[in-house]
Amino acid sequence: MPIADCGFPPLTVVPGSNPRQVVLGSRMLVDKGPTTSVQIGFTPDLFHADPNIVQAAKQSVLNQSPPTLVEALIDSGASDSCIDESLAVELGLPLVNRVQAAGVGGGHEFNVYLGYIRIVALNYVQYGRFMGVLLQDGGQPHHVLLGRSLLKDMILVYDGRDGTCRLAI
Amino acid sequence: MSMAQETAHPLDIEIRAFEAKRKELERNYLRKFVVFKGGEFVGAWDTFDAAAREAVSRFGRGPYLIREVGAPPPVLPASVLFHNLRAAE
């Protein structure tokens, strides 16, 4: 069973700290949240009518040597997975909708893109539509939110006591 | 407020066409997924996947509009709202 380690080691040295400071893994898990590396992209054959072509496209994505990995937050508070808006634009994901979502301070508009999210450690690909949200511009360290529509196929074990978190499929 | 409102949005033509036909779409295609390209209604499908398959096959990377007729507004993840709030402070 493939398992992705999404937590933190027991102790992490704060980069550049002098004298050296360490942070507990349990603290890192609170501050940053469960995190895993993903690849984002688009390939038209994932949306092909022939299931054999879709399967071959999935395999091709899984076999890619990842050109760019970004960090994704495992967000059980999100129903669907989301991609950072600026990353979606940078990657040229197909834009397929603009939606109005209610938020604090009034309505906000968000773009919707076609694409895939590959969880490298699990050899897993989710493809479909993803809302572009302001993660980097909002000060969040992640580029992707992995929501419950992805987690429905997985097992998530979160141990806040020691800072470990494991995602399995 | 969004970047989409500050400049012309790539889907403006398609969204205007959707809005112009909204009543008709709601009468005939409620909860179906419709595709618009360049202001033209392309068709309606039962699922998003089916609509996306057709749109990608015909128009590649687009842009094109795929929208569910009568869909409720999406719910934003709390983490997005939280960080927007913090950024506004």
Image: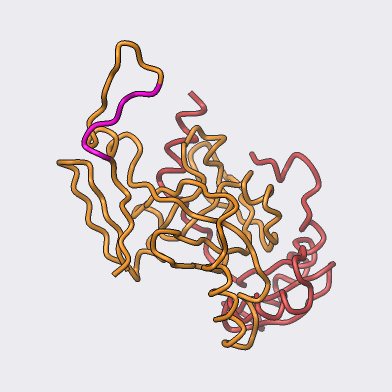
Residue A67 falls within the magenta-colored stretch: no
Q: Quadrant of the C terminus of chain A?
A: bottom left
| Left or right placement of residue A144 versus residue A114 in this view | left
Coloration mode? by chain
- Name the spot of residue B1 as percent of width and height, x first: 64, 39
Residue A144 higher or lower than A96, as above or below: above
At x 49%, y 50%, the residue is: A144
Closer to the camera, B67 or A85? A85
- Name the spot of residue B66 as percent of width and height, x first: 67, 69
Q: Quadrant of the N terminus of chain A?
A: bottom left
At x 54%, y 75%, the residue is: A59
| Left or right placement of residue A158 versus residue B50 in this view | left
Residue pushed farthest top?
A: A19
When asked about the image quadrant of residue B17, the answer is: bottom right
Image colour for chain A is orange
At x 26%, y 39%, the residue is: A9
At x 54%, y 52%, the residue is: A83
The magenta-colored residue range is: A9-15
Q: How many marks?
A: 0
When asked about the image quadrant of residue B43, the answer is: bottom right
- Name the spot of residue A69 as percent of width and height, x first: 53, 49
Residue B32 higher or lower than A104, as above or below: below
| Left or right placement of residue A168 versus residue A65 in this view | left
Closer to the camera, B41 or B21? B41
Residue B6 higher or lower than A50, as above or below: above
Image colour for chain B is red
| Left or right placement of residue A39 versus residue A145 in this view | right
- Name the spot of residue B30 as percent of width and height, x first: 60, 78
Residue A14 falls within the magenta-colored stretch: yes
